[in-house]
Image: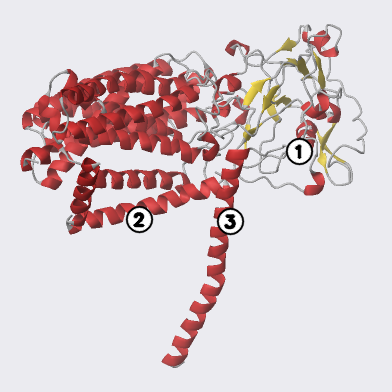
Amino acid sequence: MSVIKDALGHAITKLTTANKKFYIYCLVLLIIAVLGLGGAITAVAEGHYHSDMSDMVPWGILISGLAFFIGLSAGATMIGLLIHGFGRDDYHPVGTRAILVGIMCIFAAMGCVMMDVGNPFRAMKIPFLLRNETSMFFISSSSYMGFTLILIAELVSTIYVTIGKAEKRGKRIAKILGIIAVPYALIVVHSFTGTIFGVVKAREMWNTPLLPVHFVTSALASGFALVILVTIITSWVNKKDLVSRETYNHMGIMLCFFLIATVFLDTFDYLILSYSGTAEGLETWDIFTGRYLPTFLINMVGLYAAVILTALKKFRTPRGLFYSSVIVIIAIAAYRINLITIAQLVPLYHELGEIQYIPTMHEVAPVFGLIAALMLLFAILTKVLPMEDEVHTTGH
Amino acid sequence: MSTFDRRQMIKLAAAAGAGVLLPRKVQASAGLFEGIVEKISQGIKGTIGKEVETPLPIPGARFGMVIDLGLCIGCRRCSYGCKLENNVPDAINPPYIMVLETRYRPGQVIDEDMPVGGHHNGNGLLYTKLRKDRMYMPVQCNHCADPPCAKVCPTKATFKSPDGIVMMDYNKCIGCRYCMAACPYNARRFNWRKPELDPERINPLVPVRTDGVVEKCTFCVHRTRRGRTTRCVEVCPNRARTFGNLNDPNSAVSKLIVSERSFRLKVGLNTGPQIYYLTRPKEKPMRWFKPVPISPDVRGLKK
């Protein structure tokens, strides 16, 4: 009890003694969150008719958001594996932040689903009161709960280790959780998220056994890029490098490796699609390279540019990695939109003609509101929770 | 105008604006609040169609349908009749049955003087000229033997019943629309907004759905399990549709599906569609029956 009391007292002191910029930052995020989430409340109360989704395009930007955020959360767990599995202690200052990034992203993913479904209150009955074991949606959503629990347990144990309250057993628990989070995230969580789409034989672009692999590589790249971004921004805000230049260099090499795997799969996926033997395949290719060319270009050009940037040592600096990470995150967001939403624009009957989808403000605003709300929570948590770098500096 | 007057006017305008806008905002907030409370209640209790009794499946039956493309004239009465029969709101568009229009292909013979039944004009059927360069193909739920929609539904809201009908339990549907993404036939419809139905036109045998749930063709389960045929079959003026028990070798559908002209949609996907189509015969001109008289109980078509 005394630990909790101390922690609460510490948190309140930290929040009340924060500087003005922090309050302004939080206020701006709060305003965006309230405005954005207002749209989500309207959708729950009145239905999704404000969106551009239709019976032809049943999954819009929010389901793309689900896949994107799940990927980010899965990739962010890599830091735990590097620290505990590969003994890279130089990543230690990023440890807690990476876990928090993972938790925020899984919240964002589940938030996207909840804002997208027709009855979120009924959806909460999954997996206990409503279930269908053959549904990948059921398996995935159940795995998200398990993943959230693992991440929260990992966070708590890491905090105990950071503040020096963990004994040998506690440290071992933190290590085990750090290691198992990665295979769980990649094999269970993200592969099954890819399988949600992979099992749909009605859609040419989705129905491939390579989709889960594709999801895993892109998750590693985007999640790792997000952690790099958080590390760099934290360093800039604190005016003190969180990790050494050597670690930044290593981060760049890791990101490059994940990107090469992603680009390899993306390139050959599209190449084979362009030679498709089916009318649907060719039509998908036409849509990607025709009406929705900008999204396709952002995806492919972005990934290739990021590979080149991270492959060159002179760009593996904080600034260079900042740009590379931003490009990677945007490129993989474009990939998710391309794969999930734009791929649905191929009509299931040729006679239905051209199908359009452009997300409306009612779809986009809740996503930004959700991101703002979770950025706010992340800012508060990183302020009040003991971070490795602060504890080591101040000697708490 | 003096400054005083201008100020007074601004004040008046502000008061009037507040008078108009504030109640609306309050109303809107109350509407939102009601909507959320309603959703929570539906989520917990599941009250859709509780007052409607769905008949049990007929033992040994496996329902199927045959649509003769040589007879379909694209009048869309099947679509319209289905919509009225099944309490499908106007907001659901396209309705359960979509009639695809394709270009005429060589070998297909159509009599250009044939009249075509269209939607009603208040007093009876509105006839239009059949376009000889077009052919028509109604598509709807195929009630697959191995339905992908039922496999992917996370809550078993969609299920395959023993008589072959792919059914919906609206009180289990969370509105995730996975079934819609997985259906190769584009047969499912989502209630994007709260359905508005004329209370006088509501069929008491069919549950009225709410926003946020998916719905689809049920082969008129409230009729077919009581020994009647589907509404689309009943209202077709050219008898292009035949409904029946595929397990009965003497049924009309069982006799038709063995025809050389018989085919099913997207069989390569191995979903086992239970709707069969008959291609238009090359050698014969398209047959034409006089439109069947509209029975007075055809919902909504009587006026």
Q: Dot 3 corresponds to which residue?
A: B31
Residue at the spot 28% in from the left edge and 24% down from the top edge: A220
Q: Dot 2 corresponds to which residue?
A: A31
Q: Dot 1 corresponds to which residue?
A: B51
Task: Name the quadrant of the N terminus of chain A.
Answer: top left
Disc 1: which chain? B
Tell which residue pokes out farthest to the front in this image.
A1
Does residue A260 appear to the left or right of A129 in the view shown? left
The amino acid marked with disc number 2 is Ile
Q: Residues within 10 Å of mark 3 (few under 14, many from 20)?
A: some
**A200 lies above or below A105:** above
The verdict on a common chain for dots 3 and 2 is no
Contact, CB < 8 Å: mark 3 with mark 2?
no
Q: Residues within 10 Å of mark 2 (few under 14, many from 20)?
A: some
Residue at the spot 42% in from the left edge and 91% down from the top edge: B3
The colour scheme used to paint the residues is secondary structure
Q: Position of residue A337 (x, y in %)?
A: 41, 32
Along the polypeptide, which appears first: circle 1 or circle 3? 3
Disc 3: which chain? B
Residue A151 seen in the figure: yes
Q: Residues within 10 Å of mark 1 (few under 14, many from 20)?
A: few
Residue A25, label in figure: none
Residue A393 occupies quadrant = top left
Disc 2: which chain? A
Task: Name the quadrant of the C terminus of chain A.
Answer: top left
Q: Position of residue B253 (x, y in %)?
A: 81, 13
